[in-house]
Image (tube, rainbow, N blue to C red):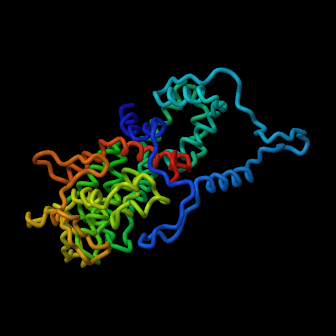
Amino acid sequence: MQRRQSILTVFVLVAAASAAVVATAESPAPAAQDCTLDSVSETPREMWRRLSKTAESVAPSGPRLASDATTSRRRAVKPPAGAAPVAAKNFIDTETFAKMTRDGVRWTALSSDEEFLRRVSLDLTGQIPTAARTKAFLADTRSDRRDKLIDELLASDEFSERWTLWFGDHVQNVRVSSNINLNQLGRNAWYTWIKESFRTAKPYDAMVRELVTGRGGAFTNGPANYWVRQIQTNGPVQDTFDNLSADSGEKFLGLPLNCISCHNGLGHLEQVNSSLVKRTRDEFWKNAAFFATDIHRPQRDQVNNVVEYYIEANPNPARARYQLNTTSGNKTPRQPYTGQPAFVDPAFFLSGETPRSGELPRDAYARILTAHPQFARASVNYLWKEMFGLGIVEP
């Protein structure tokens, strides 16, 4: 039970969220000319219309049988009457059923043992249950057999493998990207670390902190590859700092920060992301500055004849800051504002919080990021989408 509670610390967030991550406007317009958006996604209204049409084609709400005389557009199978389900498991049930009651939302019948077995197996392991498991579960007469099944699935190798695949996709653990080549050794080291984290029920926020602060050789220390994945080789090192800031904002805060890495939000993002309209590029630089005290140092692995990157402190303290006045690379020139120094110091994008005295900037960023409510909201939304197919918010 202790293991179950530990690994479920992240899954518990899913139904407990009361706030949502940033969503796009209802009717987005073409982006400004200096933005890199090459297409405009469908609006939420268009998406729901498409999904409703698809759902109706596979589960029509008209008559179920030719002999059924009803012409109602309601589902043929109605929810059961009676009192609401008793929230006997956890506070998520309490919140969910209470809100359903307040909003007049009818609940469906309790799933059968067969339905429950299939659904929970797919959710937690990505696999349908075997015939042997199905027979054993249906023959089990214990009143807590469902709880026991959940514990068994959470402790299985299949659970670790299924969620390693999800998290690996989330943080882009692939061998080659347009920016950089992790090489097979880097990719495998990262995969092994992710899988071991799920196998040992490491809390999700601890995983993220380890990624954000990953140091050492990428072939031996899996989390170091989070930095390596974001290396930009065709410009100054600030481009890499920017990538790390934007990616951590997107993956762990649900915030698409990349647009303001090149320009202020005002005059560019009104029709794309209203929450970033009043944000400035200087605020983004400060967030990227958390990474500026470290560097990535390439070193050829003589045994495998490939380049391994080492993530370590910048040996030149005078240069261990986020420097402005760059004119090359992947971003527009980093011009300081009037009266601004030629560098910026780290400050968290959402709160302005800075490192504590003696605290390493990347350690501070990992601490501040995972403690902010937006981290919980974004985590809930990503996991909810994985479990249910649609996020609470669909940008």
At 26% from the left edge and 56% from the top edge, which residue is drawn? 287
Q: Quadrant of residue 193?
A: bottom left
Question: Between residues 174 and 287, which one lies in front from this camera angle?
Answer: 287
User: At which x and y percent is residue 75?
Assistant: 76, 39
Residue found farthest to the top: 83
Q: Quadrant of residue 344?
A: bottom left
* Side (left or right) of 54 relative to 211: right
Question: Between residues 281 and 50, which one lies in front from this camera angle?
Answer: 281
Residue found farthest to the front: 338
Q: Quadrant of residue 121?
A: top right
At 59% from the left edge and 37% from the top edge, which residue is drawn? 116
User: At which x and y percent is residue 3?
Assistant: 37, 36
Question: Between residues 285 and 145, which one lies in front from this camera angle?
Answer: 285
User: Vertically, is 305 above or below 255?
Assistant: below
* Side (left or right) of 90 relative to 201: right
At 63% from the left edge and 34% from the top edge, which residue is drawn? 111
User: At which x and y percent is residue 273?
Assistant: 45, 56
User: At which x and y percent is residue 350?
Assistant: 31, 48
At 43% from the left edge and 64% from the top edge, which residue is drawn? 268
* Side (left or right) of 393 relative to 62: left
